Amino acid sequence: MPLRASGLHKRFGGVTAVADVSLDVRMGEIHAVIGPNGAGKSTLINLLAGELFTTSGSIRLDDREVTSWPPDRRARAGLGRAYQKTTLFPDFTVLENVRLAAQASGSSPLRMFGSARADAALLGRARAAITRAGLAEREAAMARALSHGEQRQLEIAMVLATEPRVVLLDEPLAGMGLSEAREIIALIASLKADRAILLVEHDMDAVFELADRLTVMQDGRVIASGLPEEVRHQPAVRTAYLGNPEAFE
Amino acid sequence: MSFRAPSLAQALLVVALVVALTLPLFASVYYLQFASKVLITGVLAMGLNLAVGQGGMVSLCHGAFFGVAGYILALASPGYDAAPLLTTLPLAVIGSAALAFLIGCFALRTRGVYFIMVTLAFGEMLFYLFHDSGIAGGSDGAFINARPEILIAGRQWFSLDKPLAFYFVMLALTVVVAGLLTMLARSPFGHALAAVRDNERRARSLGFPIFRIRLSAFVISGALAGLAGYFAAAQFGFVAPQMLSWHVSAAALVMVLIGGLRSVTGPLIGALVLTGLEEVLKAEFENWKLIEGLIVILLVIVLAGGLRQLGFLTTSAQREEVAPASGAGHA
């Protein structure tokens, strides 16, 4: 199993943000996690990526126990992550942002000699990722000069350039216009062939279009999990989304 | 972060090198020694800038790395004889690097202002260690009676004793250090270091081992400060605890700020400006430190970027435009 979480708990002082969450992300599948605000989705992603450590429970990446690994080690082991709030290197160009991502997972990421920009293999990987994310024409632009949607595309290009086997996408469509969102949805759908993808997203249309498997969280717990068609008809899920019942019609 | 130097900067670099190479033809011994001093502090400032400008680590303990290397030379010098250059120099540099490694292991767990404070504390600890413990003369300092030499089979092949030889060694050292730092800035490591500086969280999530990257840069930077400290001690023929104090670190930091954080050789200009300023003011005024302080404040405010350069490093928030891409020129 590319990514398996079992019995994850996370407490912040007296507050339990994530309680007994277990889920599997399979190769070639998009596993979507939904739930109302404050359900613990972002905490879950941070636990899986290693930015937060679990209070208890276990995380396995390709059947290796990674629960105590820091984020950089998980990334080198094949875990890629796109952030909800765009976090790029704003003063670097698009190409340099993605080239850095490729470098991080390359064979000698910290070589102290030779020009970083002369590495043809890394540049090739970076350009391929940029093209795939649809940013080929913006290669030379500074990351800070990109539009919101382009910055999300750059996020995804950076994740692609690390060539991960497991991808965590935290609300990749947040704040996007309709046409931009269409492009990203198509891009995400095209990624799953040789990857395991965990997707946290608020846009229900996108979720039901993309998800092969669906987990619903509320108050830090999993209230339903399974195939999207099964999950959407469960009473507990309908109750959780009472404020927004049409999302499930 | 444009590394392709504009032709103007390249031309200036060539002119500076020609002037430096021909300096002994028209300068007196006094000015030759002054030029050596500028180059030594230049190496210190360039080394510091690897940590500050490239790595975003504003260190106030580089004076300690500088001073400890000087003390290693003083302690290794046998009485009234010259110390062997080929063994004491590596010893001093490795000593400073080891110290930087030790301090870095602790200090690099903090960020921003806290990092400045922790490095300041470590630097002052070392200052008082040498000041109060009686090592090498305690607060009085210790003399280095003969400058290091290279002795093979009882014959002296080379000595740092002659100002001309000393000057050319410093010039060669400066060129080599500038070359090494330029190479480092362009290397994958240099790019990773800049990435960690600009967005630590993202760099880590991409898979960069941020602690190791920052520690490596800090150790190299400390080793370069030690390299400068060794030759400073050799030139003065004297070491005192003041060599380790935070004043040295602060002066080097000012040189970095004057020269520009985004340039490898910029701190050399800072070293020339500050050391030259001291030289002129010392000769003319009694309260020269007061005047120097005012001029430095003015310089740092007026110069492009100025203090804002430091501001963005201590507030790890979104940073503003610091230097235009072309400003990174003379690298």
Image (cartoon, rainbow, N blue to C red):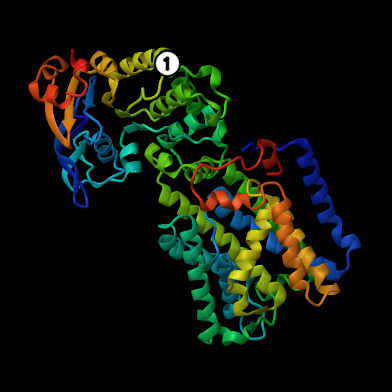
Label 1 secondary element: helix
Query: Where B239 sits versus A64, above or below?
Result: below
* Quadrant (top left/top right/bottom left/bottom right) for the C terminus of chain A: top left
Q: Is residue A246 left or right of residue B270?
A: left
- Location of residue B102 (image quadrant): bottom left
Residue A227 position in % (x across, y down): 14, 18
* Quadrant (top left/top right/bottom left/bottom right) for the N terminus of chain A: top left
Residue under the image location 22 percent in, 21 percent down: A244
| Along the viewing direction, whichever of B76 and B179 lies nearer the viewer | B179
Query: Where A211 sits versus A86, above or below?
Result: above
Residue under the image location 39 percent in, 42 percent down: B204
Q: Is residue B107 left or right of residue A138?
A: left
Residue B37 visible within the image: no
Residue B70 position in % (x across, y down): 61, 73
**Residue type for callout 1:** Glu
Tell which residue pokes out farthest to the left in this image. Answer: A235
Q: Is residue A216 left or right of residue A114?
A: left
| Along the viewing direction, whichever of B320 and B151 lies nearer the viewer | B320
Tell which residue pokes out farthest to the front in this image. Answer: A243
| Along the viewing direction, whichever of B266 and B200 lies nearer the viewer | B200
The chain identifier of the residue carrying mark 1 reads A
Residue B325 position in % (x across, y down): 66, 36
Question: How many numbered callouts?
Answer: 1
Which residue is the site of mark 1? A180
Residue under the image location 40 percent in, 24 percent down: A175
Q: Residues within 10 Å of mark 1 (few under 14, many from 20)?
A: some
Residue A49 position in % (x across, y down): 29, 38
Residue A180 visible within the image: yes
Query: Where A248 sits versus B121, above or below?
Result: above
